[in-house]
Amino acid sequence: MFFAKIKFLLSAVFLLCLITAEFPAQMTLKDVFKNDFLIGAALNRAQFHEEDKRGADIVKKQFNTISPENALKWGAVHPQPGRYNFAATDRYVEFGEKNKMFIIGHTLVWHNQTPNWVFEDGKGNPVSRDELLKRLREHIRTVVGRYKGRIKGWDVVNEALNEDGTLRETKWFKIIGADYLAKAFEYAHEADPQAELYYNDYSLENEAKRQGAIELIKNLRAQKIPVKAVGLQGHNNLEFPTLRQQEETITEFAKLGVKVMITELDVDVLPRAARDSGGADISQNFELRENLNPYAKGLPDAVQKALAARYAELFKIYLKHRNVITRITFWGVTDADSWKNNFPVRGRTNYPLLFDREGKTKPAFDAIIQSARQSN
């Protein structure tokens, strides 16, 4: 009887080993890509405050770098002259440090979500170039200085280019001039000489805009400004960018001697609201119509498979260029959190990320894991 029990136990152990070998525990993204690049997500307030426990747990398990969706934008952190609000940003940084993550600051200079007071005097008139430069420097030195050595990389300037590659005529540009970009990078480097500094933009896969960004980076580097990387936002859909566009863009920036990051990755599966509704210009706003929200009750299997295939082909390119790409960050954690539910049409049901509305992995998750395994 004793030997029979031993034989039974050994058989059970052997069977368990076979099952484990055939069905290994699900690997995490940060483990799969640990030798390739950092992998991260953009967090909202509820996640880094851990009020959204499910979302926070996904982040802690899957990712090794984080970006803030809105907490570090000028309007949130510096809403009025002389008044800073660091409560949320302190929690964001503490969350990253507690979980040993590479922490990103997003963003120091942008034409959106910047209060009007920044550009105006007490009477509502535009301030002088010198005054705006003074305000810019004070803001950057205060924000970057507070997190010196803790936030490791900064999106210094965000979305400074038009679609044709020219500089946007923002209030920064109109008051200061084209050198506002160089000044912003200079001030950030002064505040934390060890921090990595990035230029971040969308649709750089389009040739005209990409050429404008290339000239911008060349100009900054000619002035000895330490631009570490270019952030390709990666707000994609099932057709854009083409694989050729994606690969050419990565290669062209690599030739400049800068690294490349995919900084705000998602894949929109819904119909375009208009021919020119691509990109990430948040001023776009289209009326909700039934034909623009075809998957309100769930994503059909065919589209789910198309999304998985799309992510797989993109990650094959990212892995091919892992010597240049240092970070990939998804813009959001689950489909429920994604800004694409409301942009450019408010109230839609979109499915652009790797985790569904219940926090479960989607076929797209498995597809990029498989891409990683095939590349090694």
Image (cartoon, rainbow, N blue to C red):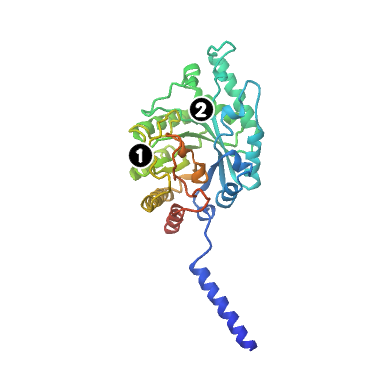
Which amino acid is tagged 2? Answer: Trp
Q: Nearer the viewer, residue 1 or 101?
A: 1
User: What distance separates the C-alpha of mark 1 from that of mark 2?
Assistant: 33 Å
Q: Nearer the viewer, residue 360 or 101?
A: 360
The residue to which callout 1 is attached is: 291
Q: Where in the figure is residue 238, as x and y percent of width and height?
A: 36, 44
Q: Where in the figure is residue 137, as x and y percent of width and height?
A: 59, 23
Residue 161: in sight, yes or no?
Answer: yes
Q: Looking at the image, is mark 1 or mark 2 earlier in the sequence?
A: 2
Q: Residues within 10 Å of mark 2 (few under 14, many from 20)?
A: some
Asked whether disc 1 touches disc 2, contact meaning CB atoms under 8 Å apart, the reply is no
Name the quarter where the N terminus is drawn: bottom right
Q: Secondary structure at mark 2?
A: loop
Q: Hey, which residue is sitting farthest bottom in the picture?
A: 1
User: Which label sits in the foreground, 1 or 2?
Assistant: 1
Q: Nearer the viewer, residue 271 or 41?
A: 271
Q: Residues within 10 Å of mark 1 (few under 14, many from 20)?
A: few
User: Is residue 362 shown above or below 111?
Assistant: below
Q: Where in the figure is residue 296, as x and y percent of width and height?
A: 42, 44
Q: Where in the figure is residue 329, as x and y percent of width and height?
A: 50, 43
User: Is residue 138 shown above or below 29?
Assistant: above
Which amino acid is tagged 1? Answer: Asn
Residue 147: in sight, yes or no?
Answer: no
User: Is residue 9 shown above or below 317?
Assistant: below
Name the quarter where the C terminus is drawn: bottom left
**Count the marks: how many?**
2
The residue to which callout 2 is attached is: 110
